[in-house]
């Protein structure tokens, strides 16, 4: 798996998760994985660089479902995967089916968690996400998160997993319930990176749980996390506000090539918008014969504009514009 030294964050697409998604849950339960394939393609097209795969549907054979989902995703796209399960058998089945280095989500210092996950990750050469949760529960300060992170690295090392394969999640907790924890999480990002040399990840949407207009909170928190140095963001890449936030933040953080990418993508969006306006503005024809010709001409111009926008995005190497 490539974590890349280029401008961050690495985007982990979160949509292959049946929680609150009845159609996806049924798709996984039936073993057809058509929705899984569709979501995989859509997320990669939108800019996801890693796909999280969670098949946690009640009363199913989770190892078989994880294997099927991993195979289905690999048929649809070529991208690293983050296997998301608390079941070591499901993780093993998915890792065995995956052709590449995967990321495992996740382990912690809670009783039995590391012992269940780390041997499987080591066996298949996977990287791991470590949640900063200790035996006594959730941390309350940035320093506590740092201390737990250090222990997570040590625990992984005891199983032969190197520091560079341990991604630390300092926990984004619901701001509506624990607003004071937002600052602690952001401070922990910098501490973990500077004192441990570890990459960091966060599930961005956790911050807005239980709140209205969640997208605004998610985007604001993501901006703050990027400024703090966040490396991997678990997000919904189909949320245009979130993706625009990432691109804008990269410009303001002076990341190499970000301004050119931003200009290119904004230009491509304008072309697509203008093409849609042109198509919608085609007047009804008074001639039954000439109407298809006029419409076809207008549609061709619109399609050419869209194709040009897509071509420019591809040439810029920017998946988010595709």
Image (cartoon, rainbow, N blue to C red):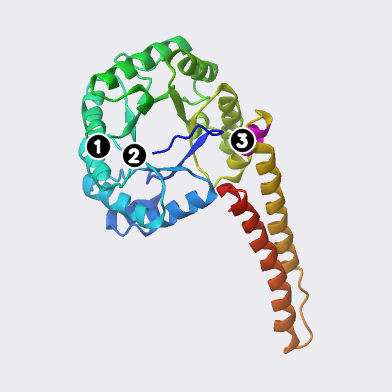
Q: Nearer the viewer, mark 3 or mark 2?
A: 2
- When asked about the image quadrant of residue 302, the answer is bottom right
Would residue 250 be counted in the magenta stretch?
A: yes
Q: Position of residue 95 (x, y in %)?
A: 27, 42
CB atoms of marks 1 and 3 within 8 Å = no
Which callout, 2 or 1, points at the residue further toward the start of the chain?
2
Predominant SS of the magenta segment: helix
The disc at residue 216 is 3
Above or below 72: residue 223:
above
Q: Position of residue 51 (x, y in %)?
A: 42, 44
Q: Which residue lies at the image location 55% right of the left edge and 17% below the top edge?
A: 183
Above or below 145: residue 77:
below
Q: Which residues are magenta?
A: 245-251
Label 1, residues with CA under 10 Å away: few <14, some 14-19, many ≥20: some
- Which residue does the numbered mark 2 point to in the structure image? 102
Tag 2 secondary structure: loop
- Which residue does the numbered mark 1 point to in the structure image? 124
90 vs 282, left or right, is: left
Tag 1 secondary structure: loop
Tag 3 secondary structure: helix
Front residue (pair 162, 149): 162
Q: CA distance from mark 1 to mark 3?
A: 39 Å
Q: CA distance from mark 3 to mark 2?
A: 31 Å
Q: Which residue lies at the image location 35% right of the left edge and 22% below the top edge?
A: 163
Which callout, 3 or 2, points at the residue further toward the start of the chain?
2
Front residue (pair 123, 29): 123
From where the camera sits, is residue 87 visible?
Answer: yes
Quadrant including the C terminus: bottom right
Label 3, residues with CA under 10 Å away: few <14, some 14-19, many ≥20: few
């Amino acid at each position: 798996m490539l974590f890349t030294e280029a401008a961050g964050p690495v985007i982990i697409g979160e949509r292959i998760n049946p929680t609150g998604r009845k159609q996806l849950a049924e798709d996984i339960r039936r073993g057809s994985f058509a929705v899984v394939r569709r979501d995989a393609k859509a997320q990669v097209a939108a800019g996801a660089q890693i796909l999280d795969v969670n098949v946690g549907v009640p009363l199913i054979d989770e190892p078989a479902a994880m294997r099927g989902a991993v195979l289905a995703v690999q048929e649809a796209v070529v991208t690293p995967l983050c296997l998301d399960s608390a079941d070591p058998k499901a993780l093993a089945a998915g890792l065995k089916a995956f052709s590449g280095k995967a990321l495992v989500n996740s382990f912690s210092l809670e009783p039995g968690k590391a012992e269940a996950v780390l041997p499987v990750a080591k066996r298949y050469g996977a990287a791991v996400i470590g949640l900063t949760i200790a035996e006594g529960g959730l941390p309350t300060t940035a320093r506590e998160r740092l201390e737990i992170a250090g222990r997570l690295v040590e625990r992984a090392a005891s199983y032969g997993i190197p520091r560079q394969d341990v991604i630390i999640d300092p926990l984004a907790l619901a701001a509506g319930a624990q607003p004071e924890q937002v600052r602690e999480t952001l401070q922990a990002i910098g501490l973990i990176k500077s004192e441990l040399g570890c990459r960091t990840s966060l599930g961005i949407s956790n911050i807005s749980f239980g709140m209205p207009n969640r997208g605004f909170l998610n985007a604001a928190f993501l901006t703050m996390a990027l400024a703090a140095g966040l490396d991997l963001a678990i997000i919904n890449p189909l949320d245009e506000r979130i993706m625009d936030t990432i691109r804008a933040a990269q410009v303001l953080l002076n990341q190499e090539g970000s301004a050119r990418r931003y200009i290119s993508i904004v230009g491509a969006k304008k072309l697509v918008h203008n093409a849609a306006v042109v198509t919608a503005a085609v007047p009804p024809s008074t001639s039954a014969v000439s109407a298809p010709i006029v419409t076809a001409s207008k549609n061709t111009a619109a399609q050419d504009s869209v194709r040009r926008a897509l071509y420019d995005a591809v040439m810029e190497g920017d998946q988010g514009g595709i």
